[in-house]
Amino acid sequence: SPSSRPNAGNVDGPGDKAKLATPQRLALDGKDNLYFWDEDNNSIRKVSNDAAHTVSTFVSKLTENSGALLSQTFLGGKLYVYGTDGIEVFLSAFDTEGKKTSVFKGRADLFGYDSSSSKTLGGMTNDGSSLILFFNGQLFRVTPAGAISPIAGVEGNKTDPSSGYDFKAPHPGQKAELLFKNQNSTAGMSVFLGTDAASKVYVSGRFA
């Protein structure tokens, strides 16, 4: 907890006087202002691009229960955050004033899965026009309006490659195996995504 470590806490102000508690999941807004999830304070905080590197609380209470923010990215001047509230998956958008709009919130049936079982969540990025996120072994494209469509990956969160599967060979998107092993619904946050100038998508994976 914030009180258990030297200098940890929840204090806004100039960067050299502010106190944080487990900052992670960084995002830049295009103006060199830095946003991060302050996990132990359950908030999104901002480091302004000013002389004092002023820290302020952008969203004071992000999740309910034992939730977690998995990834965040800026698109169209809004901060999109992807995570779980401990029960359901959520994708929310925040404007520059911190006003929240829900893009989607629900269980696995949002992505076409059985909603009664736990699924592996993961990272998120964007290609300049839409969001790209990982869920249960697949990559999905999500529009700012909330339309979800699959891009690549084998349904079911495979944990071992199929016999004879060659990772170096090209595969159609819906037959590509994106492997993640020994991870539960929130540990999937170690999935990292990125795009390049040609809107190609890159995803990390592990099966060891």
Image (cartoon, grey):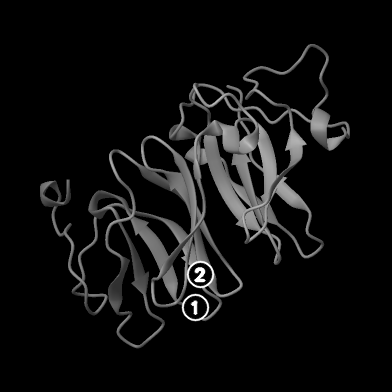
Name the secondary structure under disc 1: loop
Left or right: residue 180 compared with residue 17: right
> Which residue sits furthest left?
3
Q: Which residue is mark 2?
A: 28
**Residue 22 drawn above or below residue 35:** above
Other residues around mark 1 within 10 Å, as few (<14) / some (14–19) / many (≥20): few
Left or right: residue 62 compared with residue 177: left
Other residues around mark 2 within 10 Å, as few (<14) / some (14–19) / many (≥20): some
Q: Which mark is residue 14?
A: none
Spatial separation of the CA atoms under disc 2 and disc 1: 6 Å
Image coords of residue 91 (percent x, y): 51, 52
Please tell me which residue lies in front, 112 or 189. 112
Specify the quadrant that holds the C terminus: top right
Name the secondary structure under disc 2: strand
Image coords of residue 36 (percent x, y): 39, 61
Amino acid type, residue under disc 2 in the picture: Leu
Query: What residue is at 16 percent from the left and 59 percent from the top?
Result: 9
> Which residue sits furthest top?
163
Residue contact between numbered discs 2 and 1, judged by CB atoms under 8 Å: yes
Amino acid type, residue under disc 1 in the picture: Asp
Q: Which residue is mark 1?
A: 32
Image coords of residue 32 (percent x, y): 49, 78
Query: What residue is at 88 percent from the left and 35 percent from the top?
Result: 170
Quarter where residue 38 is shown: bottom left
Please tell me which residue lies in front, 135 or 49. 135
